[in-house]
Image (cartoon, rainbow, N blue to C red):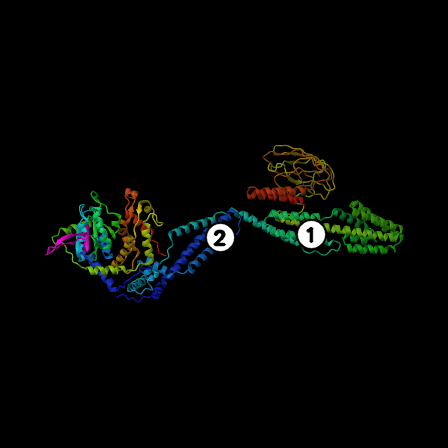
Amino acid sequence: MMLDSAMDVGESAVREFVARATALETEIAKVIVGQREVIRDVLVALLGGGHVLLEGVPGLGKTLLVRTLAGAVNLRFARIQFTPDLMPADVIGTNVVVEDETGQRSLRFQAGPIFANVVLADEINRATPKTQSALLEAMQERTVSVGDATRPLPAPFFVLATQNPLEMEGTYPLPEAQLDRFFFKVLVPFPPADVLRRIGRQTIRPDAPTVNPVVTGDELLRLQRVARAVPIASHLEERAVAIVLATHPESELATEPVRQFVRYGASPRGLQALLIGSQVRALLDGRYNVAGEDLEAIAASALRHRLILNFEGQAEGISPDEIVGEIVRQTAAIGRT
Amino acid sequence: MIATTATAATIVHTLAPWRRQLRLARCLRWSLRGVIVGLTAAVLALVVGRLTPWADASAVAARLLGVCVVGAALIGLAVPVSARRAASSADRVAGLADRVVTAWELRDRDESFARLQRADALARLRLAGPASLQPRPARREVIALAVVAVMCAIALLAPNPMTEILRQQQAEQARIRTAQQQVQALTVPKPAEDNQPALDQAQLDQAVRELAQQLGQAKDAPSALAAISKTEQSVRAQIPSGGDQAAAALGAEAAALQQNAATRPLGNALATRDSASLAKASAALQAALAKLTPAERAAVGRALQNAADAGTSASSSPDAAATSASLRAAAQAVQQGDLGEAGAQLGAAQSNLSQQLAATQVTASAQQTIAGLEQARGTVSGVASVPGSQTGAGQGSQPGQASAGQAGTAASQTGLGAGPNGSGADQTGSGAGQSGGAAGDTGQGTGSGQGAGPGQGAGAGDGTGTRAGGTGGRAASGGTRAAEPGKTTPGDQVFVPGQAGAGPSLQQTGPAGPALGSEVPYQQVIGQYAQSAREHVDRGSLPPEVRDLVRKYFVGLEEGSGQ
């Protein structure tokens, strides 16, 4: 069975996709040293129309990555520094009383920073759940409701949130519903020695590299539509479904670690992330079809934040990535005959 | 620019070499599995052939292997390889990242993306080629093959404990077949003998034919021997009582009649056992009586009288007595010149003689058949069957000599055995024997008897015991067979070598035997003992060689009983 492709995409569109994506990667790599997998995952989420939660210790370039990306796509960028006293209105905006030249007073909506194309929600877990929830509607519906009015957000709309896994004091872990709205959760690893050397050399130079916009908003929307047309073989669809089902401890496909350490598995949004991310990755690799290796490559990013560990799993320090890796290995034979 | 004109037919065409290669690989893989399954089945067959005597185990194992390999290879060739499977294999083997299988699924789609994808997949598929698809057996299959191959080699090369048993069985079957042919030879139609009742001959032939059929179905020597024994008993039952005496009486009468020229044809007819000639000679004598002189009639009368006396002395049977009476009456009538009465009495005598002739013919046929059956029995048991050779012809205890024997084996506890039973020809006497119990117990026995007969015989005793009716009875020996053939001399005390038993002996002074002249035939008891022994060894967990030893022992005894 194939995913139904509603749009007829020509070879030129595919070529444009590869060219623009390559240009984006190149521009970002001018500023971000190393972290190629992180850059690739962020690009996949951007071209797939999803939001990204970046997790890593301070100083690894998370914010710089987002700023660089925003600069490369020539879109309106907004940064929100999440703090405990940040209010929802500080994010989405509010109605304020204004007086016109005739002295007439009226309420006017003052848009918040979320009315941008690329929004950086820095240290998102430092805000209260109330403020975090203000992002829910924006991320999923791409609209903001204030008072009686619902206002659409600009397209494309891309939220990149960061969080620090170490400093947990005074933080508010994101609720499951919030986490599920992130297309990918990307772990930013500490760079190895050679990358560190290159970071040191590049950042102490007086002439810091500049980023040039290579993709417009309209082009980005077109690229997103092209990616959705990439065909997926039926056995790969089956495998994606099996992977998601296997994350549920009550499923017949569940692996032993899932049964032992997982409380809730991935939602259908996880399946969407798997399939769409695979389509984008296939195009980035110059393929016109999704391959099993695409699913394997993005499975952890798409599912790790959607696995809710039980107490035993948390106490044992089980990594969701290990569980996902085991599931991916066990489903490798699906559809091979 | 990628050519986007690839169609479903193009994909199928491009996949064709892959499908052929996959089919070949599948055939090889299935063949390997067939070898594994076939070797496993062959090992099972060979193992069964080691647990039970199975002559065809190796042949069946080879057939199983062949059938499994050929069957598996045919299955591998017969089951077609689908295009989708070929596409999936090409993706996996050539590292095409699911391009071909996706192209196969998109083969009927007309979107530009589908056309692009198909063209890309086919271009890469053509570059890869099916040569990269090399059939490689799975590791577990190789291990399984090695294991079953080693097991099969062990099962083939290791000594098979059933080989000797099979060889014995084959030899046994060959002997049974030979015996069957010998028995079938007995059924060859014999020249008609008008003085032998057709019913008796037909019964004999029927019994022999049934025996030949039973031998053809016999699976082992004991069953064949049992069939032979049963037939022999039925044949013996057909022998008229006093058949031997009738023959002796006829011989004596013939000799007496041959002394006179006028009665010589009658005597010759009797001597040749020719019933028709007897009738003719009788009629001729009746016709000639009137032409004879008184002196010649007197000579004829004396010859008839002598024949009557000889018949009376040779046989005490009622037939012989009736014949003698007729001959005496005929002699008296001839001497008195009463030719009418003489003719009537001669006719009666001729009729009686014809009946006696028929009785002797039946006896001869039955004895001939019995001899043939004895030969077949010897063939089946694998022992040379020369009548009389096992008992030592002519040997026997002399009157008054003590005979001694050894107690039987502990296994039998009663010292059952067979030994030469002295029955000295034309000698009478009595003897006393003492039996020494070799198993620790002692036993005494006395035996006295009167021996008469052709000078050989066979007997059985239980070691000790009074054999009042015995013929110089010799105590039995247990353990091994009777006296070795031909190694005894007449009149010797023959101690049949037997093995002393390790257990207690039940040798006791036996009760008084049957009264003089009422011996229990040896055949009546040895058959029961032999049958009981066979049943016990068949039920018991004895080694095959011990079973054979016991069987042969009783076969030897049975053969001795038939002589």
Q: Could you tell me what secondary structure mostly forms the magenta stretch?
A: strand
Give residue A239's position: percent from left, percent from top. 33, 54
Point 32% across, 52% down: residue: A243
Q: Give the camera-side residue of B71 and B83.
A: B83
Q: Earlier in the sequence, mark 1 or mark 2?
A: 2
Is B306 displayed left or right of B523 in the figure?
A: right
Q: Which residue is mark 1?
A: B204
Give residue B144's position: percent from left, percent from top. 41, 50
Point 27% across, 65% down: residue: B2
Q: Are marks 1 and 2 on the same chain?
A: yes
| Quarter of the image where the N terminus of chain B is located | bottom left
Q: Disc 2 marks which amino acid?
A: Ala
Give residue B543's position: percent from left, percent from top. 55, 42
Give residue B371's position: percent from left, percent from top. 68, 49
The local crowd at label 2, few if under 14, some if 14 to 19, many if 20 or more residues have their Cα within 10 Å, is: many
Q: Which residue is mark 2?
A: B61
Q: Secondary structure at mark 1?
A: helix
Please say if B3 is above or below A330. below
Please say if B109 is above or below B332. below
The local crowd at label 1, few if under 14, some if 14 to 19, many if 20 or more residues have their Cα within 10 Å, is: many
Q: Disc 1 marks which amino acid?
A: Leu
Residue B247 seen in render: yes
Q: What are the residue bounds of the magenta stretch?
A: A92-121
Q: Which mark is residue B475?
A: none
Task: Please report, as a chain letter, where disc 1 is located.
Answer: B
Q: Secondary structure at mark 2?
A: helix
Please say if B507 is above or below A113. above
Task: Please report, as a chain letter, where disc 2 is located.
Answer: B
Q: Is residue B465 magenta?
A: no
